[in-house]
Amino acid sequence: MVVIPLASALSVALTAHTAFNLTKLRSPHWNGNEITEKVSVLIPARNEETHIALTIESIRNQIGLTNFEIIILDDQSTDSTAAIVQQLAQSDSRITLVSNTTNPPEGWLGKPHACELLSKKATGSVLVFVDADVSFEPQAIAACIELMRDKEFGLVAPYPQQLADSTIERLVQPLVIWSWATTMPLRIAERSTRPSLSAANGQFLVFDSHSYTAAGGHASVSGQVLEDIALMRSLKRVGSQCVTVNGSELAHCRMYENAKELTDGYTKSLWNAFGSPVGSIAVNSLLAFAYLVPPAAMIASRKKSHRLAGAVGYFAGVTGRALVAKKTGSKVLPDSLAHPVSIAIFIGLNAVSWSRHLRGTNTWKGRVL
């Protein structure tokens, strides 16, 4: 049966590309020179009372920035988010609280609308959009700005370390970085203005303000559920070079804390990740072929040659997952050994996402998407 050797060969090829890609993955480091231009750190916040103070404190402690402002938009929170920010602002003139009391206009989703409002308040030549549940190392922002100015990028998109404690988190969260580290040619992507070569994480985005404005800002992605990737594509369409970087030494975030949060978080957007139902079917079929067929053959095939070929494919997939985990601060073992289980769960989440989308039941933070 030729299917098993082909599936294993694909797994080996993808892992070989992963290994090469990781040698090209940039990890920003600050060299000690002060950033003298004004930096606007912009935080959309909706019911973030658990995290917001820690996020703001980590930004206040940034080094290498001589002139920066922190603007937080309270987006109709029903908890104490606004009160916490207001208290912090009383002792630090760099902090400004802005309140949004209206629902997003027709055609807008909540986060793009909040970020667009924040951008209108910003006065810096660098715009740093961060989520309200991310904690930053002291050199994080300076390191990214330094890379952006040195290489003349319009956008630096670091992927923070994704903290994962529960079993479901450890199975699924590492796939966020693994997916683009395995499939996207990183050095080609950073030189290319092809929108398809884009990967970004809205938890931490560093823009040159002129490039952001030229691309239309968040207004250009007003209805996009994956607004972070859409923003990078918008910048590339107007000729800006953008770079996806390893941010695991700069920031960390625990996106979800249980299975329900993770399911809701992924299903709200996975339907949109691959362009269309046909695209989703194609990508998920490819994942199943490369990462589920080999271990299934290794376990269940009656022919020794098929079991051996399956074992090669399985361990190739495990190796690729382990290489990315080691590079980006995720747990390597035993988590990487369960890579086929992770892929199977991811395929299931795609199916649930499409089902919810077609039925109009995808929601996030109390808003229908």
Image (tube, rainbow, N blue to C red):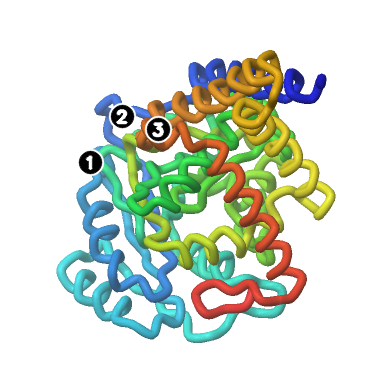
Q: Residue furthest front?
A: 302
**Where is mark 2, residue-wise?**
30
Q: Residue 23 at what x, y percent from top left?
A: 49, 17
Q: Quadrant of residue 76?
A: bottom left
Mark 3 in CB contact with mark 2 (< 8 angstroms) = no
Q: Residue 129 at what x, y percent from top left?
A: 45, 54
- Which quadrant of the figure contains the C terminus? bottom right
Q: Secondary structure at mark 2?
A: loop
Viewer-side residue, 168 vs 365: 168
The image shows residue 92, relative to residue 145, as above or below, that is: below
Upstream in sequence: badge 3 or badge 2:
2
Q: Name which residue lies at 74% across and 18% down.
A: 5
How many labels were placed on the picture?
3
| Amino acid type, callout 2 | Trp
**Mark 1 nearby-residue class (10 Å; few <14, some 14–19, many ≥20):** some
Q: Quadrant of residue 247?
A: top left
**Where is mark 1, residue-wise?**
63
**Mark 3 nearby-residue class (10 Å; few <14, some 14–19, many ≥20):** many
Q: Secondary structure at mark 1?
A: loop
Q: Name which residue lies at 66% across and 15% down.
A: 304
| Amino acid type, callout 1 | Ile
Q: Name which residue lies at 51% across and 52% down.
A: 202
Mark 1 in CB contact with mark 2 (< 8 angstroms) = yes
Q: Name which residue lies at 62% across and 45% down.
A: 232
**Where is mark 3, residue-wise?**
328
What separation in Å lies between label 1 and label 2 (alpha carbons)?
10 Å
